[in-house]
Image (cartoon, helix red, strand yellow):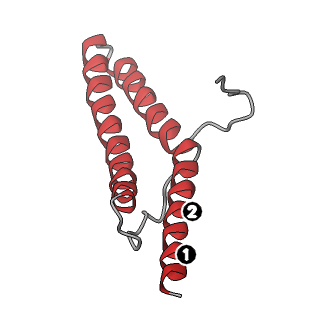
Amino acid sequence: MTADFRNIALPAWILLPASAASILSTLVAWGTGSLWLGLATAFVAAISVTWWCERTLHDVIAAIAQIAGGDRYAALPRRIGSGALAAGGAAAEAMRQALVDADALTVD
């Protein structure tokens, strides 16, 4: 299975913080004249962005795991992001709704 990435918009929820981290480290290195301080800033910024993205993914995955475990009324996070994360959230919502509909049919 091949993927066509030419028509897919870049997910801004990852792109913007990652770009901000790289710009910040470049400005620190340029402003202070210290490559090591710029590298340290890049390292700290990369860890911060990674933690933030991981936290966002964790919230979505936790809700999907609840739905897969049988909790038909688990709530997905309101703002999921864009790109594949939004598509995964939409698929999880469709799965949750199908389970609710199946329960309603069983009761009838």
Which residue is under mark 1? 101
Q: Residues within 10 Å of mark 2 (few under 14, many from 20)?
A: few
Outermost residue on the top side: it is 35
Residue 59 lies, with reference to residue 73, above or below; the image says: above
In this rendering, the label closer to the viewer, 1 or 2: 1
Which residue is under mark 2? 94
Q: Residue at x 59, y 43 (%)?
A: 83
Foreground residue, 88 or 20? Answer: 88
Foreground residue, 53 or 64? Answer: 64
Residue 46 lies, with reference to residue 63, above or below; the image says: above
First in sequence, mark 1 or 2: give its number: 2
Name the secondary structure under disc 1. helix
| Residue 19 spot, x, y in % from top left | 49, 32
Q: Residue at x 55, y 80 (%)?
A: 105
| Residue 31 spot, x, y in % from top left | 37, 22
> In which image quadrant can residue 48 be found?
top left
The amino acid type found where label 1 is placed reads Asp
Q: Residue at x 33, y 29 (%)?
A: 46
| Residue 97 spot, x, y in % from top left | 54, 70
| Residue 106 spot, x, y in % from top left | 49, 80
Name the secondary structure under disc 2. helix
